[in-house]
Image: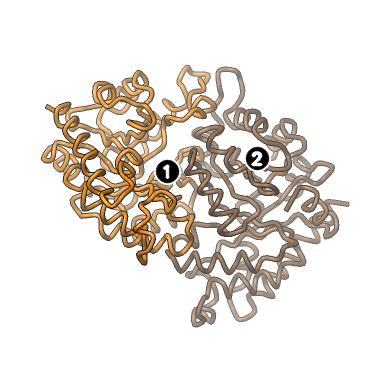
Chain colours: A orange, B brown
Amino acid sequence: MNYQELVSQIKKKKTFLCVGLDTDLDKIPAHLLETEDPIFEFNKAIIDATKEHCVAYKPNIAFYEMLGARGWDSLQKTIEYIPSTHFSIADAKRGDIGNTSLYYANTFFDTFQFDSVTVAPYMGSDSVTPYLQHKDKWAIVLVLTSNKGADDFELQKLENGQLLFEKVLSTSKEWGNETNTMYVVGATRPALLAKIRKIVPNHFLLVPGVGAQGGSLEKVVKNGMNDNVGLLVNSSRGIIYAGNGLDFAEKAKAKAKEIHAEMAQLMS
Amino acid sequence: MNYQELVSQIKKKKTFLCVGLDTDLDKIPAHLLETEDPIFEFNKAIIDATKEHCVAYKPNIAFYEMLGARGWDSLQKTIEYIPSTHFSIADAKRGDIGNTSLYYANTFFDTFQFDSVTVAPYMGSDSVTPYLQHKDKWAIVLVLTSNKGADDFELQKLENGQLLFEKVLSTSKEWGNETNTMYVVGATRPALLAKIRKIVPNHFLLVPGVGAQGGSLEKVVKNGMNDNVGLLVNSSRGIIYAGNGLDFAEKAKAKAKEIHAEMAQLMS
C-alpha cells in the first residue's frame, strides 16, 4: 500500500487505528483451542469484527515464531486474510545488515506480502536501507519506545546536544522519505512527540502505548497529527482481549468502535 | 552450555572457531537441491565435516525464516543435529520488550533449544534482561559491528565522552555477568577491540568479520583474548561455501582445519 492510499483510507473511514494481533494461545477463548488452527481462527474473527473501525493490522511476530513452523502457517493465513484495504505491519523489529537484511525484507515483503516491517536502527544505514528498495513497501524504524529501558540509550545525550533518538530520526530520514519510512514513537512521552514531529513533519508515526500502557490518545493527536493525519495508533490487548468468552469478537468490536469514535471526533 | 563447559571445550580442542550456517538455496551445491530438505542436508554435511575443528555453530535465522514454515523445519532439524559438545547461537538479532522478549527467548531457548541468541540493545534493559532468566542460556548483545553503518550510531560520541557502543557495554554488563552475556564485536576494528576488552575483561566476545569481511585473526587475538580465551570467532561463507561441487564438505573441512591450526598456534 502506498502513502496516498493509506491517507485516503484514514480520511475516508475517519480512523487511524491499528489493531495489534498479539495472539497468544494462553489468552484466547478456550472454545477456539479445539479448532485446527486456533491462532488463525481467533485472528479471523477479530479481523471480521474490527475491520470497519481500523486501517491497519499489526501481527507481533514473536507470538507466531514461538510456535515454530505451525506459527508461521497461522501467520501466512492471517496475512492472506487481512483485507487489501488495510495496511499490514510485521512487528518483527529486525535489524541486520547486507544480505541478511535483504532476506528479512524478502521474508516479510515477498514470502508473507506484508506492507511494512518494524526495524531496529542500532547498526545504522545498511541495516535499514535494504527495506527501502521494495516498491510501496515500508520500513518502520524504532525511534523512541514507551518502555523503561528507553532511558538507557534512546534518551542519552550526544556530544552535539541531540538525544540519541533525535540523531536516529535526523540521520535515517535521509535514507528514504515519507513514502517508504515510518517511525515507532511510544505514546507515553507526548512532549517528545512534538519534538519528533518537528524533525519529521511529513512521516507517518506508528504509536503504540495508548490504552494498556497508559498513553493518552488526545495528547498523541495534539502533539503528533499533521495535515495527512500522519499517525497510526496501535492497540493490541485492549481490543483483542476485551472479552474472553464466546462473544470475544463482539467485545473486541465494541472496543474498536469506541476508539474509532474518539478518533473521528479528534480528526474533525 | 555454561561458561566453564565452553572454556573447557575451547582449551581441549585448541580452537575458538564458530561456523556460521548462513545456508542459502541459491548457493548450496546443485546435487543437494534434489533431496527432500536441501538446507538440512547441507548443514548436516557441514557439521559432520567441521565439528572437530570448531566449538560453536551459528545459524543465521534470516536464511531459514525466508523460507517460511519449511525453513523453520530445517532449522529445527539442524539444531537437533548440532552435537551437545558445541555451543549453538541463534543469530536472530532480536530486540523487543516485556512479553515479546520473553516469547523470543522461549522460541530460541525452549522451542529450538539454542544455547544463545543475538540481541539488539537499542530499547535498553527490558529488551535484554528477559534473555538472562534461563539457566545456562545466553544473550549475545550487539555492541560494535563491522559494517559501514556502525558510524551512524554505534560510534557516536555521548556528552560524557563515551562512544555509544561503550555506553552499551558499560550499562549492559550490569544486567547480567560473564556467565549469561556475550558481546558481538566486529573484527575490522582491532584498536576498539582492545578498548572493549578493558570494559569487559571476562566476557566472551563473538567476533564476525574475520576472512570474507577483511578482519585479521591475529589482531583479534592480540587485542581480544583473555585468560579463558574469551573469544568465539565466526566464519560463515569462507568455510561453508569453500567448495560448490560434490566435495563441498571436504572443502569446508579443509578450510575449517586451516583456521583451527592458526587458532591452535595463536593459543599456545
Tags 2 and 1 both on a single chain: no
Task: Please state the horizontal and vertical placement of residue A206, each as a whole percent of the image.
Answer: 32, 36
Q: Chain of mark 2?
A: B
Determine the residue located farthest toward the right in the rendered image.
Answer: B268
Task: Give the total of numbered labels.
Answer: 2
Give the residue displayed 59% in from the left and 43% down from the top: B131
- Left or right of B179? Residue B141 is left
Q: Nearer the viewer, residue B236 or A265?
A: A265
* Residue plotted at (11% across, 27% down): A268
Can you tell which quarter of the image residue A82 is in? bottom left
Q: Is residue B30 above or below residue A54?
A: below
Give the image location of residue B219, x and y in percent.
Answer: 74, 44
At label 2, the amino acid type is: Arg
Between circles 2 and 1, the one closer to the viewer is 1
Q: Image quarter for residue A152?
A: top right
Crowding near pointer 2: few (<14 within 10 Å), some, many (20+)? some
Chain letter for mark 1, please. Answer: A
**Residue B68 visible, this angle:** yes
| Proximity of marks 2 and 1: CB atoms separated by less than 8 Å | no
Under mark 1, the amino acid is Val
Q: Which residue is mark 2?
A: B189
* Residue visible at 59% across and 49% down in the picture: B117
* Image position of A103 with respect to A239: above or below: below
Residue labelled with disc 1: A119
Residue B89 percent coordinates (x, y):
63, 54
Work out whether residue A59 or residue A167 is closer to the camera in this orientation and state it.
Answer: A59
- Gap in Å between the C-alphas at discs 2 and 1? 25 Å
SS state under label 1: strand
Q: Nearer the viewer, residue B173 or B152?
A: B173
